[in-house]
């Protein structure tokens, strides 16, 4: 349970930091920092718990929200020191994505026993906080960026379920899942890895963009 | 129950196809196709089940998600063959809207016995997947298009509750509800049907659009 | 309980009116007015009830939705009489924000006993309907406006929990919470009050806005 909890707090904290960085890019005030940090930090896990019909994790334990608030204050105090806040945001988002893909898969598998559901809850937990952050801050969605993103979450979540099938200890399965998601998303950020993107055949009508 | 299940799978599959088509317009990769297809296919029913405090349908039965993934792969392979992908998207969305208006009303009426709630859950189920698709893909919301859209879902859902009041067999009520929603939305697509849109009086201040 | 119910209906009605005003700005049809009014009116409370694992309030009592529909019709009939619909929208939003900050805190405190959770559910209830309205109508989010917004909701919700700690009668605590949120947000609207906004140090890279 310790590895789970550590991953959970780490994921919440780094996603909260990305929300605060988005707030700094929009020049919000300090309460705006806390609000956007909290929504980004706990949004993915909230959706996961709702669809799994589990009590929402931060309602059981409000410390998660206080972590978000503390992170928001720290970012408010230090964001001006960063060379490129958007780069920092992307790398923290990468850590959060990896932590939540593992966590979300673990919680989904424990709640339902279904590998399919575990992979989906891993992907949802990992991506939904960032989706909310981008929607609320009016930033282009990280989902639509060219480099691999959702795929990294899927691979991490799938790795966790494979670890379960192989009877690995949970801490090991979580670590492997985190590492796989991180290597894939991190590689995508560092080296621009992409999967082949859909390309309509030249000369075809791609439809009105009304 | 068979008519219900058939409508449900049909709605999920065609909405998934619209999500995949939106992914193709954004030139996402294959995992992006699957992700957007799944969110569009199961988003409306997920919200319906959450507000009705029912178990989320795809958590009970992950086959729905696999249908979305299969549809996404099929669209990835064939989208370039389509003359106008946006037209296809709108017509599939029309079928999904009609199926989910009927389904959503049936589930809302069964869960609460309230006609008002049934009409609302019909509308929510029918429209929310498309709303999520447009938000996540950064497309202009189908809700804001000039032709009749939400009204078709409302009419279909209302028709289902009327069928219940008249003690029609459920299969008949579902078919009638589907047909009414389809004829209204289809007519709107084909002939540009609109309800009168709100027009501020000429010369009035319409407010800053800051 | 009467003060609670009155605040609840008032909050739903005025948020519904803001949704209908947004619909008028987008020149939707009458069903579009009702739909956007209902989503704005009940969206915040829906999220609150879902995260608290309470039955959704409008599913228990569909009258809330009928209130939204009636308000939407009234706005449809009268919006052209208003000098500046966006100003009216902002002031109604201010009333709704204040009512829901108090209500949301009360419901969160009653459900969990946690002051932290109560403040969060107050903020969520107060802001989420407006966030949904702006997202669905394609308007810039009220969250990103320069004047104090979320902070007013937080102050009102915190005041309610303080009232609880001081053993004030609930009606008094609700009234104080409403008044504090209203004075802060109203002052922000009237006098342009802001908290200090985050300012990156001059000459620093603020990151690509790709």
Image (spheres, coloured by chain):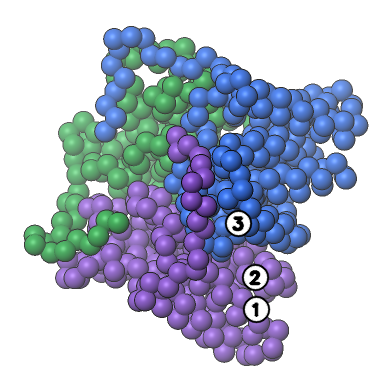
Chain colours: A green, B purple, C blue
The N terminus of chain A: image quadrant: top right
- In the rendered image, residues at marks 3 and 1 fall on the same chain: no
Q: Foreground residue, A62 or B153? A: B153
Describe residue B83's horizontal placement relative to residue C161 as left or right: left
Q: Is residue A152 visible?
A: no
Residues at marks 2 and 1 touching, judged by CB atoms closer than 8 Å: yes
Q: Residue at x 72, y 57 (%)?
A: C67
Question: Cα distance, mark 3 to mark 1?
Answer: 27 Å
> What crowding class fits label 1: few (fewer than 14 Cα within 10 Å), some (14-19), or many (20 or more)?
many
Q: Is residue B4 visible?
A: yes
Q: Residue at x 56, y 70 (%)?
A: B154
Q: Secondary structure at mark 2?
A: helix
| Among numbered discs 2 and 1, the one appearing first in the sequence | 2
Task: Give the residue at mark 2.
Answer: B118
- Residue B73 percent location from the top left of the image: 26, 65
Task: Give the residue at mark 3.
Answer: C76
Whether A34 is drawn above or below A55: the answer is above
Whether A42 is drawn above or below A17: the answer is below
Q: Residue at x 29, y 69 (%)?
A: B87
- Residue C1 percent location from the top left of the image: 87, 44
- Residue C92 percent location from the top left of the image: 66, 40
Question: Cα distance, mark 2 to mark 1?
Answer: 7 Å
The chain letter under disc 2 is: B
Q: Foreground residue, A165 or C86? A: C86
The chain letter under disc 1 is: B
């Amino acid at each position: 349970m310790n590895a789970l909890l550590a991953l959970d707090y780490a994921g919440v904290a780094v996603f909260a930091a990305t929300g605060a960085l988005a707030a700094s890019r929009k020049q919000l005030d300090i309460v705006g920092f806390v609000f956007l940090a909290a929504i980004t930090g706990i949004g993915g896990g909230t959706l996961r718990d709702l669809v799994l019909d589990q009590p929402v994790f931060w309602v059981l334990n409000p410390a998660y929200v206080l972590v978000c608030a503390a992170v928001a204050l720290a970012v408010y105090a230090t964001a001006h020191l960063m060379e490129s806040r958007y780069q920092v945001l992307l790398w923290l988002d990468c850590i959060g994505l990896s932590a939540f893909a593992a966590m979300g898969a673990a919680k989904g598998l424990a709640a339902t026993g279904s590998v399919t559901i575990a992979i989906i809850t891993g992907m949802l937990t990992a991506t939904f906080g960032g989706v909310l952050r981008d929607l609320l801050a009016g930033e282009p969605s990280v989902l639509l960026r060219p480099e691999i993103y959702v795929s990294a979450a899927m691979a991490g979540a799938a790795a966790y379920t494979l670890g379960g099938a192989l009877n690995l200890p949970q801490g090991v399965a979580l670590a492997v899942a985190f590492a796989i998601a991180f290597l894939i998303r991190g590689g995508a950020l560092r080296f621009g890895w992409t999967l082949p993107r859909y390309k309509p055949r030249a000369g075809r009508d791609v439809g009105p963009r009304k």
